[in-house]
Amino acid sequence: LAETPDDPIRDFGFSKSAEQTYEHWGKTHTLRQMVKMVRLFRPDILIPTFLDVPGQHGHHRAVTQTTLAAFDEAARADSFDDLGLPVWQVNALYLPAWGGGGGSYDDEVPPPDATHEILTGDYDPVLGGTYAQVGEWSRACHATQGMGRPVDEEERPVPLHQLRTASGTPVHSNLTEGVPETLAALAAHCNADADGSSDAGPQAATDAQQAAADALAAFPDSKAVMGALCRLQSALLTLDAHIVPAHKHRVQLKMRQVAMAASEAAALQLHFEISPTVPEIGSTAEARLSWHVADTANAPRLSATLQGSGQLDCGAFSDTGDAGRRRAMTAPLTVSAPPIDAMAGWHGIMAGPASLHAEVCLHVGDSQFVLPLCPDTIFSTKPRQTGHIAPARTLLRLGEDTGFDMQLLPDATVPAAEDAKLSLPDGWQFEAAPAASSTGMSGRVTLASDARAGHYRIHATLADEPVYTAQELAYAHIRRQKRFSRAAADIALVDTAGLDGLTIGWIDGGVDEAHHWAGQLGAQIVQLDDSDLQSGSFDGLDVLVAGVFAGGTRPVNQSMRYIRPWIEAGGHFVSQYHRPVDNWDRATSSPLPLQPGTPSIRWRVTDASAPVQMLQPDHPLFAGPNPITDKDFGGWIKERGLYFASEWDQAYVPLLAMSDSGEKPLEGSLLAAEIGAGSHVHCALNLFYQMDHMVVGAFRLFANLLTPFNGK
């Protein structure tokens, strides 16, 4: 539903209710975006993916509520009329007739009865798989979520519950009842000519249906296909002039699809490139449209216009004069401020491109096919000054550190040194080092003598222009793109004891970077490899830490037979949160029996400001080296924690209690046990995320977790 980088509709973290989600997204704004999408894409059927029931993800519940509301609101002329889009009445509204249980969610209400069923198991030679397989391919693109799984070509009925229809009468047969399924069916939705005759529109619908069938039958004879497409385009133009407004979009959609087919039939292999790929504001770029000439005798003639937003001054295309197999035309493009982000508005076959594109016209005999074409690389423009500030994140100990080194590293040669400025907090000073080159600026930042603990952010300017940092996104399933955000350096100034003198063996799960912060606090970090774990090579270590999800990829279970005796001999073991799927075994993943809760929605606290009760305020873990108070739980973001323990050995002492609003307090977020001469702490608080975002109290608590104790 989001259209811009700063849109509040984003995955801000986990939520348990629609109301909690709307606090971030805005209920009216979310509905407005859904109504806009419905009016823009004009679907005949709406089907949310999840049910709006307790136990389901709050984001999902909010989208389902909004989808149901948009069924009515998109059809109301007085609803969001500022969008400037014609109203649209969706034909039918369905709900999934399946539940959302499993390891993450826990639907409390059973799904509604199925009224319809879609069979998704047939192999589609055009898509290259079944619908179920295509769906899993899409899910697999959520790589960080571990989604997507192989499925076979087998019958997979999808049950649906019909909730409402536009007519108010239940549709008992197929899903598309009341909707024209073919071009020929549009004959029933045509207006009469000015002279009162009513033959032209219906005849055009019939002709279009036949021409489409001829094009399909002619494949792969490209010349015959093109002839049929020309007849189809002619029929569609006539049909477009006679069709009633409610179905006009179907004809226009088909014309865009026909243009795509014509491009394929002519083997044009269109390319649309911008040089430079990401032009700088204030500069002029070149747009280059090129195509392959497969048959010089029958090749279509191409013309094109360049179209873009208000920041772009689009010139006219001119032929480059290339005479080979690949022809080209170019157009000048002048770029103005503000920068254009790679994240553009919605677009697709139904909706035209929202950003820079070329309207390409294929001339084949007397027929014309119009095809909107986006650049091969997602278009964006870049600010005048780009670079980064290093280090991006710095941890300083109040009373111990008086300053730190910093560099401003522009992506291009910097102007005069006096033109480079840092936005420092009051009283902080920057002393530049002697310039060694013109490719950057370095120096030392000195803190104010009265600086207080907190999170500080520093920005930079060059020649009075803000400096931005580029992020390149390049994945197999999307086109390459660049995003820009203000260059920043974040500093956490924390009143905390250090970990100086401690040697910590780290079992890294590849998820978090808490080991970095432990090192910043003064500890010596030893990254343990699998052979260390499988042989129990823990000599010289004061502390062992199992990182987030480490058991899923590292032999933690196999190593527990060494870890347990090491603890009993005086070692201090800290385990961060794990999921049940991370090879967790109640008896062997922890030195004493302990079990993360499932489904996860029941064993997490999503409100980052949820009250925290210290159940054992005098416990050594809260006493030192930092005295922990309620203040240390202030300013947290995203959440308190997740995958809380649901059961544990009686030797463990629960130290904290917390809950989301209206729920029973959970006590499995922080557990501590004395085992022999040593100790074990299991922490399901999201400390690493807090530290990565410079939350001061998280560092203080983290230092305590890593400090050995024996309660004596």
Image: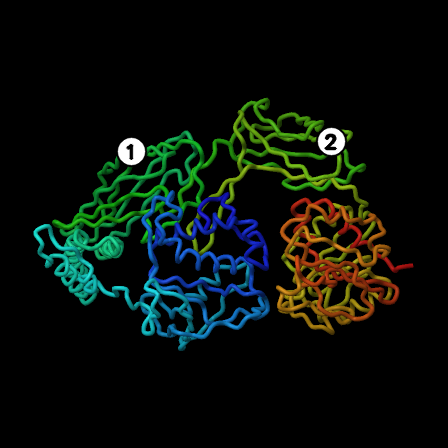
Residue extending farthest right: 712
- Give the Cα distance between marks 2 and 1: 52 Å
Q: Is residue 701 visible?
A: yes
Locate residue 178, reporting x and y percent: 28, 66
Of the 4 image quadrants, the one containing the C terminus is bottom right
Tell me the SS state at disc 2.
loop
Mark 2 Cα-neighbour bin, 10 Å: few <14, some 14–19, many ≥20: many
**Mark on residue 466?**
none
Locate residue 228, reporting x and y percent: 15, 60
Q: Is residue 428 above or below residue 94?
A: above
Residue linked to disc 2? 447
Residue linked to disc 1? 315
Q: Is residue 259 visible?
A: no
Tell me the SS state at disc 1.
loop
Residue type at the position of mark 2? Leu
| Residues under numbered marks 2 and 1 in contact, where contact means CB atoms less than 8 Å apart | no
Q: As rendered, which of 62 and 287 lies closer to the eye?
A: 62
**Relative horizontal placement of residue 2, taking residue 312 as reference (left or right):** right
Q: Residue at x 52, y 60 (%)?
A: 61
Q: As rendered, which of 262 and 586 lies closer to the eye?
A: 586
Residue type at the position of mark 1? Gly
Residue extending farthest bottom: 155
Q: As rendered, which of 250 and 356 lies closer to the eye?
A: 250
Q: Residue at x 51, y 41 (%)?
A: 470
